[in-house]
Amino acid sequence: MTAYDLSEDMLAVVAAEAARRGLNNIDTVRGAAEALDFAPASFDAVVSRYSAHHWQHLASGIKEARRVLKDDGIAIFIDVIAPELTLYDTWLQSVELLRDPSHVRDMTLSEWKRVIEAAGMAIEETVVGRLRLAFDPWIERLKTPLSHVVAIRSLQHGADSNVARHFDIEDDGSFTVDTALIVARPVPA
C-alpha cells in the first residue's frame, strides 16, 4: 500500500498512525497528484479521500489516477462537493479558502463526472451525503488565524437566507457540506 501526498506533514501523520497500529505494509511517497511517480497500470486501486480539493488541476490528477490503475482496477474518490448553484458555490469556496490557504476548489458533482469520464473511466456508483463540520475543531485542526476565523464568521452572519439554509449554518458556526463518494472503473481501450 502506498500513501501519496504533497504534504510532508500528512505523510508523517500516516507513518505515525501506521506505526501505532503495527502496520508494516504502508509506504509513504511525496508528490503531486497531477504527476504520479509510478509506472502505468501499477495499482489495483486508487483512493482519494478529501484531498482532491487541494489539487491544482483536477482533470490532470484524475488522468494520472487512471494511468496508474490496472485495467481491472477500481478508483474511489471521496470529497466535499460544491453546490451547482453559483451563489452557494461561491460562499463555500470563500469559507474553505479562508480556513485553509492550500484549498484550491471543491468541484461540483457534474464537474467530477465530466473529468472522470474524460480520463477514461466509467462511474459505477455515486453516493451523495451531508457532512456536519463542528466549527471549533474544524478551525483548530489547521490553526486558522483569528482574522480568518472572524472573516468566516462574518460570511456566515451575512449569508443569504437560502445559503444559510443550504449549509445549515448554526449559531456556533458549525455548518454542513455536501459530499460524494464516487466509484469508477477503467473503460477498456
Image: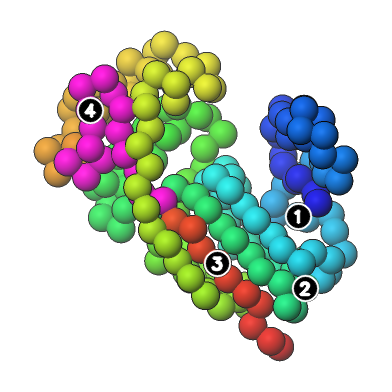
Task: Check disc 4 and report its element: helix, strand or loop.
Answer: loop
Q: Is 41 placed left or right of 160 in the picture?
A: right
Task: Check disc 3 and report its element: helix, strand or loop.
Answer: strand
Q: Please identify the quarter of the rendering in which residue 142 is found.
A: top right
Q: Residue at x 33, y 15 (%)?
A: 150
Question: Which numbered dot is residue 35?
Answer: 1
The answer to if 41 sits in the magenta stretch is no
Amino acid type, callout 3: Val
Q: Residue at x 69, y 87 (%)?
A: 188
- Looking at marks 1 and 3 on the same chain, the residue that comes earlier in the sequence is marked by 1
Q: Measure how far apart labels 3 and 4 are at the Cα level.
A: 32 Å
At label 4, counting other C-alpha atoms closer than 10 Å, the crowd grade (few under 14, some 14-19, many 20 or more) is some
Q: Is 28 placed left or right of 130 in the picture?
A: right
Label 1–label 3 contact, CB within 8 A: no
Q: Which residue is mark 4?
A: 170
At label 1, counting other C-alpha atoms closer than 10 Å, the crowd grade (few under 14, some 14-19, many 20 or more) is few
Amino acid type, callout 2: Lys
The picture places residue 181, in percent across and down from the top left corner, at 49, 58
**Numbered disc in front, either 2 or 1:** 2
Q: Which residue is mark 3?
A: 183
- Kindly give the residue lying farthest to the front in the view shown: 22
